[in-house]
Image (cartoon, rainbow, N blue to C red):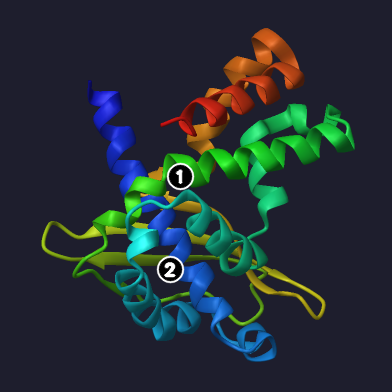
Amino acid sequence: MKQILQRRTFGRFALVGLLLVGAAVALVRPAHAADMPPDALVKSLSSDVLETIKANKSIKAGDINKIAALVDSKVMPNVNFQRMTASAVGPAWRQATPEQQKRLEEEFKALLIRTYAGALDQVSDQTVSVRPFRGSADDSEVLIRTQVRGSGDPIQLDYRLEKTPGEAGGWKIYNINVLGVWLVDTYRTQFAQQISSKGIDGLIAALAARNKSNGKG
């Protein structure tokens, strides 16, 4: 029961956090976003994005198609999802074929969208505060600590970001911490058990079956 409650709490806020930062970056011109320090980016735009989510009844109601479209258009361009998936899969990622890696990314993204779809109806009076950032301009990877404040207790929501080069570069998320639990680490433990017993193809099949099951009803 404790694990079930932890998963529900985790799911309640994880995708919300991802949407806050991912959608925020998408609201800024790419060149401007690439030039902004990661803490300033989060601080200046989170409140605007919260209002956008609050006003979208379909997303808040858990409409999978609307959430998937939002994630694809606003979140994914600002996430190093290949790194996130590779970290979740662990050492076995390096032995996976390009096709297997592609399937893992697709199924992992679908899993996150469906698992956390119900989280969005929890958005009501929340605001986000960014804690003082102690990094430097030369850092290529940073940790941004925030708190989501609402009617209940403050929620710890932290992000690991990396600086990527090129025109489409800038700061990109590759892990999220909710209430002291890192998303990638949580899934790495689950995935390792599946890989150990049935290999990469077994993990892909298990994720596909879970996503299909979650899509019913």
Q: Residue at x 55, y 55 (%)?
A: 68
Furthest-front residue in this view: 217
Q: What residue sits right under mark 2 in the picture?
A: 20
Vertical placement of residue 106 versus 23, above or below: above
* Three-letter amino acid code of the residue under disc 1: Trp
* Depth check, front residue: 163 or 114: 114
Label 2 crowd (10 A; few <14 / some 14-19 / many >=20): many
Q: Is residue 180 visible?
A: no
| Circle 1 Cα neighbour tier, 10 Å, few/some/many (<14 / 14–19 / ≥20) | some
Provide residue 153's location: percent of width, then percent of height: 14, 57
Q: Are marks 1 and 2 in contact (CB under 8 Å)?
A: no
Comparing labels 1 and 2, the label whose residue is closer to the camera:
2
Q: Secondary structure at mark 1?
A: strand
Does 19 sit left or right of 5 as displayed?
Answer: right
Q: Residue at 69%, 89% (x, y): give it.
A: 31
Q: Point out residue 133 in the picture as x, y percentages from the top left corner.
A: 43, 76
Residue 166 on image: x %, y %? 82, 77
Earlier in the chain: of badge 1 and badge 2, it is 2
The answer to whether 29 is drawn above or below residue 150 in the figure is below
Determine if residue 18 is in view.
yes
* Tally of marks: 2
Q: The N terminus appears in which quarter of the rendering?
A: top left
Q: Is residue 41 above or below residue 206?
A: below
Horizontal side of residue 188 vs 170, given as left or right: left
Report which residue position mark 1 lands on: 182
Q: Quadrant of the C terminus?
A: top left
